[in-house]
Image (cartoon, rainbow, N blue to C red):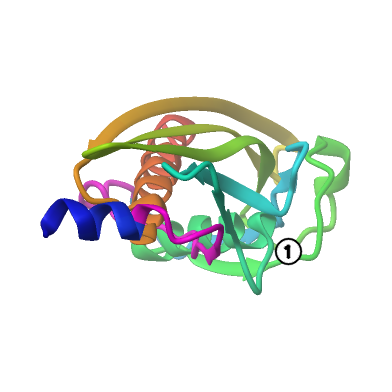
Amino acid sequence: MGLGLLLLTACAGARTFVVDLTYVPQSPPVLEAEKTVVAIAPFVDKRHDTRNVGLRRKLDGSVDQFITAPDSVSEQVRKAVGRYLRGNGFQTVAISEWDLQPESLSGMEADLVVGGEIRRLWIDAESMVGRTVIHTDLEITVCLGRPQENKVFQQKMEMSLENTEIVFSPDQAEKRLNEGLSEIIESVFESLMD
């Protein structure tokens, strides 16, 4: 009975699932904000396919898609960074854009400006009899601008993870992406704020 249900679930045809990218704390806050105001720009999505964030290949050959909605990946990454910074005591404001160049920092009314590029943010799940192997792949560059110094510092982080699940659910795909994104955010800011 259990294996039959598993096979029926794994062969239900192609579907599209919405993934909510967010920051999920992986470790306790470590930064000290001291009333610092951070302006956060949308991250530039440099991926070839900016709508999808992953696929799941099922036993019947059909393929499920994972997308973000209603916000774009760019906007959801910005919100995740903002959540991390607010959790560490920073005041955040959203700005419409930043070209990541030091020349464009002048006139910005913030202590720090954050933006960056998304090169990879993808989950690839492949279901087999009795298990699903989930590959998570992320590459994000974060740029930290200091308007008072007219300087930009950048840090690129890459992460690839593989997990195996006995029973797959779309929530696992979202969880894996959020864990990877959150680890990158924490690592980058701990490095940039030193």
Q: Please state, as top left, top right, bottom left or bottom right, where the N terminus lies in the image.
A: bottom left
Residue nearer the viewer, 181 or 5:
5
From the viewer's perspective, is 60 left or right of 6?
right
**Considering only vertical position in the picture, is 157 above or below 144?**
above
**Considering only vertical position in the picture, is 113 above or below 1?**
above
User: Is 130 covered by the magenta stretch?
Assistant: no
Residue at 39 percent of width and 47 percent of height = 182
Q: Amino acid at mark 1?
A: Glu
In the rendered structure, which segment of residues is drawn in magenta? 10-31
The spot of residue 84 in percent (x, y) is 41, 57
User: Is 29 covered by the magenta stretch?
Assistant: yes
- Secondary element under disc 1, as helix, strand or loop, is loop
**Considering only vertical position in the picture, is 148 above or below 129?**
below
Residue at 36 percent of width and 46 percent of height = 176
From the viewer's perspective, is 182 left or right of 64?
left
The spot of residue 139 in percent (x, y) is 57, 30
Is residue 88 visible in the rendered image? The answer is no
The spot of residue 165 in percent (x, y) is 23, 42
Dominant secondary structure (helix, strand or loop) of the stretch shown in magenta: loop
Residue occupying the far bottom of the picture: 70
Residue at 68 percent of width and 41 percent of height = 116
Is residue 146 visible in the rendered image? The answer is yes
From the viewer's perspective, is 180 left or right of 96?
left
The quadrant holding residue 86 is bottom left
From the viewer's perspective, is 91 left or right of 5?
right
Q: Residues within 10 Å of mark 1 (few under 14, many from 20)?
A: some
The spot of residue 156 in percent (x, y) is 57, 26
Q: Label 1, on which residue?
A: 109
Q: Please state, as top left, top right, bottom left or bottom right, where the C terminus lies in the image.
A: top left
Residue at 64 percent of width and 56 percent of height = 73
